[in-house]
Amino acid sequence: MPHILVTNDDGVHSPGILALADAVTSLGTVTIVAPAAESSAIGHALTLARPLRVEEVSRRRFAVNGTPTDCVNIALAEVLDEPPDLILSGINKGYNIGDDVTYSGTVAGALEGCLLGFPSVAVSLQRTGDPFDFAPAAAAAARVAGAVLGAELPPRTFLNVNVPRARARGFRVTVQGRRNHVTAVSKSFDPRHEPYYWIEEGESDWEPHDRSDYQAVRDGWISITPLHPDLTNYAALEFTEALSLGRLAEVE
């Protein structure tokens, strides 16, 4: 029987993680190890400046006072009796598409699993008003999980799945979308007239791309994007070599 580790960034008590775990119970033995508190937009952070604690909140469900990346490491080192056959992260409240994957704690959970050599999948659902209906995303996640368990992902590769809230037209394999970011910071003053700031979600224009994750979910498809941790821009190697050689020549 396969062993499946489930984590997220919305917290161990999020209905999204419970829906995901329930959806894959027929595929194997499921263990949840997730942040004790909501940890959205925390990216691939690893806690090094303080100790971490683990609490078993119910059978095979553990809370860690840390990040999704912490949770995957604690699960592998201390919680699980044997290595997992699959790591699932989600279901996130809101898409993780395009450049936003760099901020996402949900994607980071799957990324960490990938870096450590385990098949991993991140799952996100289009944001709606509460209550969220996680059933479509949970069903999609179960189908993807079953397929991954029956195959072998390429080395250092994980899948990023995004599900629209309306009835989907099916699955579409996509590439990571791009957008032109606009920073939005709101400034206010406290009762002592000291300034404080909120970083807000700025308006951004998506670059047109027929095969992007953004376009797929916009058109009503479930997006599946294969991602990997290598951020090297191979197309820029020649440019960078020329740039570096030029600067070295100036120094000499």
Image (cartoon, rainbow, N blue to C red):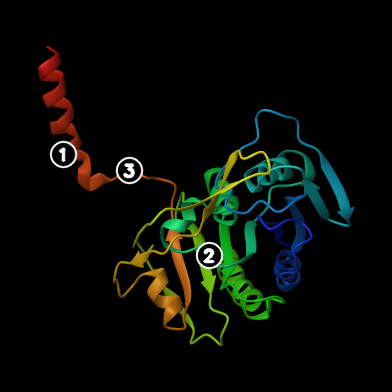
In the rendered view, tell whether residue 119 sits above or below residue 197: below
Q: Residues within 10 Å of mark 1 (few under 14, many from 20)?
A: few
Label 1 to label 3, Cα distance in Å? 13 Å
Q: Secondary structure at mark 1?
A: helix
Q: Nearer the viewer, residue 63 or 206?
A: 206
Residue pictured at 39% horizontal, 45% vertical: 230
Q: Which mark is residue 232?
A: 3
Label 3 to label 2, Cα distance in Å? 27 Å
For marks 3 and 2, give the one nearer the viewer. 3
Q: Nearer the viewer, residue 222 or 250?
A: 250
Residue pictured at 89% horizontal, 57% vertical: 58
Residue 121 is situated, as x and y percent measured from the top left of the image, at 57, 60
For marks 2 and 1, give the one nearer the viewer. 1
Residue 138 is situated, as x and y percent measured from the top left of the image, at 66, 74
| Quarter the N terminus occupies | bottom right
Identify the amino acid type marked 2.
Ala
Apparent side of residue 78 relative to residue 161 in the rendered image (left or right):
right
Q: Which mark is residue 89?
A: none
Can you identify the residue that label 1 sits on?
239
Q: Secondary structure at mark 2?
A: loop
Q: Secondary structure at mark 3?
A: loop
